[in-house]
Amino acid sequence: MKKCPPTKTHRASIGCAVFALLVLASSAAMAQQAQIIARPLTPYDITTYSLPAITQVSGGLFTVGVGSAVYLEAQVIKGTPIATIAWALTTKPSTSTVALVTSPLGTNIPSFEPSDRLTYDVAGRQLLVPDVRGQYTVTATVTTSGTNIVLTRVITAGNYVGVGFVDGNKVATGKQCANCHDGGTAPDKITPWSGTLHASMLTQAIDGLKSNHYSSNCISCHTVGYNTALTATNGGFDDVAKQLNWTFPTNLTNGNWAAMPMALKQVSNIQCENCHGPGSEHGGNITKTSVSFSAGNCAACHASGSNHIKPQEWANSRHAIAVREESADCAGCHSGIGFIDRMAGAATIRTNYSAITCATCHDPHDATNPHQLRGQGSVTLMDTSRPGGATVITNGGMGTLCMNCHMSRRDAVTYVNGPGNNRFGPHHGPQTDMLMGVNAITYGKSIPSSGHGTVVSNTCVTCHMQTVASTNSAFLQAGGHTFKVAWDHGTTNTATDDVNLVGACQSCHGASVTSLDFARQDYDGNGVIEGVQTEVKGLIRQLSMLLPPLGQPKLALADVSSAITTNYTAAQKMAVYNLLFVLEDKSYGIHNTAYTVGLLKASLADLGGTTPTPGGTAAEANAALAAYFSKSTNVLINPYVLGKGLFQMGINDIVGWQFRVQVSSDLITWTNLPTTAYPAYQFNDPDATNAPKRFYRLMYP
């Protein structure tokens, strides 16, 4: 794949301690010049911006129930001078008497999508509440410095018809969804949807199977078309319940669902029309239904209270402001729509931009994978020159989905043979390669790798999606769907107020770990044992000074990249590739301490710099172990299990050194094992079969 132009990236400096997984959207060069959107409005918005309690919630669709609010918003490229804006309702059904009115959303309320806030200014807003079924055409004429920009949108208003699938049975008639979308006229969406939690939410909750505090306040999000506004008579759940005189049961118990009238069951649970809008006008015409990839479509319910916070978390993530890359090579990761196509194996990937939203990662129609994730299969990395073939990851757990994009786009060994330039490097997200300890320049050595890639069952998800209590100052700013493991309170240069989510670390490394930058060894050889990230930054500084311009520390991605030219030697290209590999990973050793340190030390040694090692015989031995004895091309020889707990390995090129073998099941408590003498270490582990995983290490003395 081609490397995306660097002009559209925001490169992080070496001082950043947060593991940023995506770069900021900083260019609107390929965005639409202007557009009309339907701004989503969530319960969280209504509370946050002190709107009246009767304000209607909206998912931001252009297909809505009769009497439902459409919050129209005209957007122009940020910085566009706006002289005037004129709105008009140019067409509407013949029986309609509705007119556009001033939107209740004031200028203090920003656009919903964080990516839109970076790219567009709000030129104006209006409110449309369709009063009858049919289509409505709205235009907005924006005058900018003598030029008129005319924008048009069509809104479809209809009634809710229901999916036509109840209690596992197709009961569809007329225009109900299951009449076509069951695999007959259109692809089968009904069968996979029926296995999702959406399809049975009210069914289970009303029988007391979800919680003991479920109430009538919850059903607006667990039914179809629920809207108690006086204007909204459109066949939604509340309308049908009123017609049938149905009331919410006093006790949540088995049998409540069975007792509900069929007409009410038809508009219960979260169905097609919750996300696509009412179906009465659809009839197979795709212009009369909505397909939205906006997070607002989900946030209308999932941002509805103190326990429904995922959209608020996501809004503070880098996914929400993913860089705009609308080329075929890049859209498969940089656009939510493109990623969906890529994961589905589409022959052509759509390149129109959308942020990395809920629907990018979660398939609303299919519960095959945990949390309805789009992909849990294997991931193949790009290290095609690796002996035995490219690395294939099959044990990434839920983090496997992340790995499809957070990987290098290069085979390092062959790539460094090409010319150097300011776009040289592994691409912007080689976290998977780093985690697995592959696809960098190893100089023919066996560079060690830490155990995170195999020990942490859900890899990325375990650490980057930790739960944060509402009482924590980092609530909504780190963990969960922010995908961040730390928050600096907005004070980049002040570490004292930083919040580090170390719960995942402590599960293996113990309660003594209170910071991501926790001390292990003096990797950079300055005589002081500092935190891992600080030590790695010390190595980065040393290596960067051995690269042109010589003697100048280059601590940020931009500084390193801008210095690369076609005059770089082969050795310099290999070293700068490793340097960029570490910088682009952005964890500064946390993802894979051993591999990070080993790569930087190997590069230092190859450029003729001093490989940092602390003084003392024992320290020298341990440093050699940490670097996997860089003097040898074959250090760990033929490790294999002989059976009955017997494990054997051979080690070359460590003349005169005797090591202890230690074993652990949790990487915290280590126990010595009896061994034979060097240079072939053979030992017996009688407890090997009593633990799911065992870890071994050599220690000196």
Image (cartoon, helix red, strand yellow):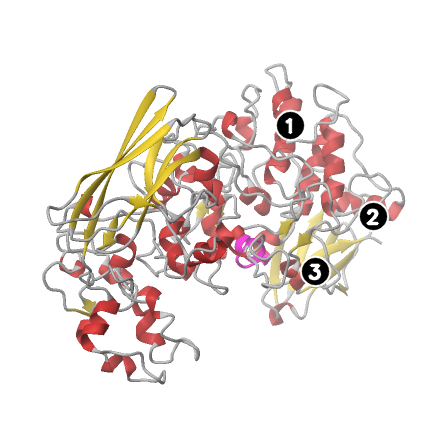
Can residue 607 be seen here? The reply is yes
The residue singled out by tag 3 in the image is: 509
Q: Is residue 443 visible?
A: no
Q: Answer yes or no: do the residues labelled 1 and 2 have beta carbons within 8 Å?
A: no
Give the labeled residue for mark 2.
657
Q: Are marks 3 and 1 in contact (CB under 8 Å)?
A: no
Q: Magenta stretch mostly in which secondary structure? A: helix
Q: Is residue 53 left or right of residue 97?
A: right
Instruction: Return the residue nearer the eye: 128 or 281.
Output: 128
Is 267 on the left or on the right of 690, as rendered? left
Q: Is residue 538 magenta?
A: no
- The answer to whether residue 462 is magenta is yes
Q: Compare marks 1 and 2 and give the one earlier in the sequence.
A: 1
Q: What is the span of residues highlighted in magenta in the rendered image?
A: 455-464
Asked if 225 appears above or below 416 in the picture, the reply is below
Residue type at mark 1? Val
Q: If the image is split into quadrants, where does the N terminus sit?
A: top left
Q: Nearer the viewer, residue 85 or 617?
A: 85
Local packing at callout 3 (Cα closer than 10 Å; few below 14, some 14-19, many 20+) is some
Q: Earlier in the sequence, mark 3 or mark 2?
A: 3
Q: Position of residue 230 (x, y in %)?
A: 26, 62
For badge 3, the amino acid type reads His
Residue shown at the point (85%, 44%) measured from the top left? 528
Residue placed under numbered mark 1 in the picture: 576
Circle 3 SS class: helix
Rounded to the nearest angstrom, the CA distance separating label 3 from label 1 is 32 Å
Callout 2 secondary element: loop
